[in-house]
Amino acid sequence: MTNVIANPYTSADWNVLYPLGIVALGALAVLFVDLVSKKHAPKWLTLALAGLSVIGAGVVCAQQYGQNYDAFGGGFLLGGFAVVMQELVLVAALGTLALYATLGDEERMAGTIALLLWSTCGAMLMAGAANLMTIFLGLELLSLALYCLCGLRENAIAREAALKYLILSSTASGFLLYGMALLFGSTGSVALAAIAQAPVAGNPMLWIGCALFLVGLAFKLSLVPFHAWSPDVYEGAPLPVTAFMSVATKVGALAVLARFVDAAVPSAGAEKLLLPLWIIAGISMVAGNLGMLAQHDLKRLLAFSGIAQVGYIVAALAGGGALGLRYALFYLIAYTFMNLGAFAVATAISTQAEEGSRLANYHGLAQRRPFLAAAMTFFMLALAGMPPTAGFVGKILILSANVGAGYAWLAGLLILGTAISLYAYAKIIRAMYVRDEHAHAREAHPVSPLAWASAAVCAAVLLVLTFYPLAPSNVIPLVR
Amino acid sequence: MSALPVSLASYIGLSAVMFFVGVAGVVLRRNPLVMLMSIELMFNAANIVFVAFARAWMHNAGHIFAFLVITVAAAEAAIGLAIVVAVFRSAKNVDVDEVALLKG
């Protein structure tokens, strides 16, 4: 050990983290401006700073596309996968900023936005994380900021949701961490690649470690036996936070899961080890969609919908190999825009006093706001996987991957889940298009242009995505 | 006085016991403060494994990971206590069975 003092990392390592750094600096800038302002920083300035940093990070990140580099001794893998995942997280952050522009109050804006940006950093770190330490760091950065965001409203329900989220999610982190400790113990390394090379036979610690790690991740993804927290937390959290949570946490955790399945699971025992994961995904598809049927709140409905959607995405990974990963990624991109779009519509019909998330708010929406009703219909059809949307294409791709890899039962469950979900999504569409005698009684407050524009952009992207991947082999040229 | 050699298995056994005590605490106790403490136990159980194996494998990644976990656990406790205080202020109660506006 002669060069203990020497810095092992070069500037190339740090360059990889530029997008993350820009977002983190943006958070600091937001706080600083608030500090030097007389009372509070003006809302538009806070949002503009945050928006600039997110867009800047997106641009820098896009320029990294096509590069491959193992930064920090394999701690953060730069590649097509990491870039696409980071861009998705940034899109979620940008969409959330647009929702905050409509709903947030100026007094708490700076702190809220700073937490949001740090949470974004966490999810971005997870997108490229390839060793246990960076995974844990990213996950905790994402989660810790989200606990605060959930509880920021002066409202008993929001705080209860924060407490619930904190305790259940931290317990999941405990499982994940203990799994990581056992994985380190059984392999002597924190790198995911080292886990794949460890001997499988007669190594119970590796099995238990993998199992605990996957349980922790399933919890974060709210797959079925570990899903009970998500409807409650979604319902209690402020609308923009729910929107962010429903996309960014899932993108981050799915990035880790995909990388773990792809790189870390020893190929000798992969079949046996991962089968429970596919079963959980299958159950999630059916149970999540069944749970949707009884809901009367859009946030709860989308929470159950999210459980099922993650089930579809994990099932795509069961297809195995690069193709399954690509299909999962395609569906994840579509899911991001569907969900953000639905939340944008909900925000557009919200007032400062009341979030427009109860199903009753949608009665007769088509009479009052024909564009918003049409956009919502489009997002619901996309979530249900109906033809003229990217959701349909995504589901077809996943089905083909499942059948091709010999998981026909997963494909069957996917179709069953879709059939069930149609009824729940149709409930919202029906509510919007049914004539409402009280339509005039509901005062027509002006719709926020930003929320309107977000919904329009999401719908446009979904439409474009529908026609893009017609040749599945070039869905997204994933380098790794 | 000679140091008794402590085998690796003992460390793992201790940490497994700690981990299950932590899980049982989260599942069985209804006071959020006790639940937070139980979560700390789970984190520290992992720390013991990390440090024990860092020595066994002669690899300092385990030590670094343990420090990372200690830092994160401190942040988690700070945020957790803040949220418990906020819940108490709005509900005047910190028993999770009584804090049940959201029926899940």
Image (cartoon, coloured by chain):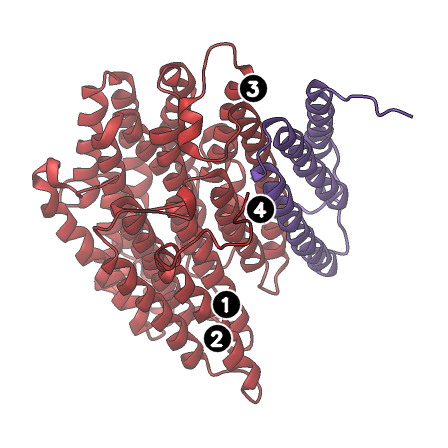
Chain colours: A red, B purple
Q: Residue at x 44, y 42 (%)?
A: A295
Mark earlier in primary sequence (3, 1): 1
In the image shown, does A366 or A300 lie closer to the viewer?
Answer: A300
Residue under numbered circle 1: A114
Q: Quadrant of residue A129?
A: top left
Residue under numbered circle 3: A205
Q: Tell me which chain the residue with mark 2 is part of.
A: A
In the image shown, does A288 or A123 lie closer to the viewer?
Answer: A123
Task: Residue A39: give x, y in percent of width and height.
Answer: 58, 86
Task: Residue A292: give x, y in percent of width and height.
Answer: 40, 38
Share a chain, discs 3 and 2? yes
Secondary structure under the numbered disc 2 in the rendered image? helix
Task: Residue A340: give x, y in percent of width and height.
Answer: 33, 55
Task: Residue A178: give x, y in percent of width and height.
Answer: 60, 31
Mark earlier in primary sequence (3, 2): 2
Residue A393 horizontal side relative to residue A52, left or right: left
Q: Quadrant of residue A311?
A: top left
**Identity of the amino acid at label 4?**
Tyr
Share a chain, discs 1 and 4? yes
**Identity of the amino acid at label 1?**
Ala
Secondary structure under the numbered disc 3 in the rendered image? helix
- For mark 2, does the 10 Å Cα neighbourhood hold few (<14), some (14 to 19), or many (20 or more) residues? many
**Identity of the amino acid at label 2?**
Val
Q: Tell me the distance, in whole angstroms, between the alpha carbons under discs 3 and 4.
A: 29 Å
Residue under numbered circle 4: A165
Share a chain, discs 2 and 1? yes
Residue under numbered circle 2: A30
**Identity of the amino acid at label 3?**
Met
Number of the front mark, 3 or 1? 3
Mark earlier in primary sequence (4, 2): 2
Q: Using the image, determine if residue A299 lies above or below residue B103.
A: below
- Can see residue A310? yes
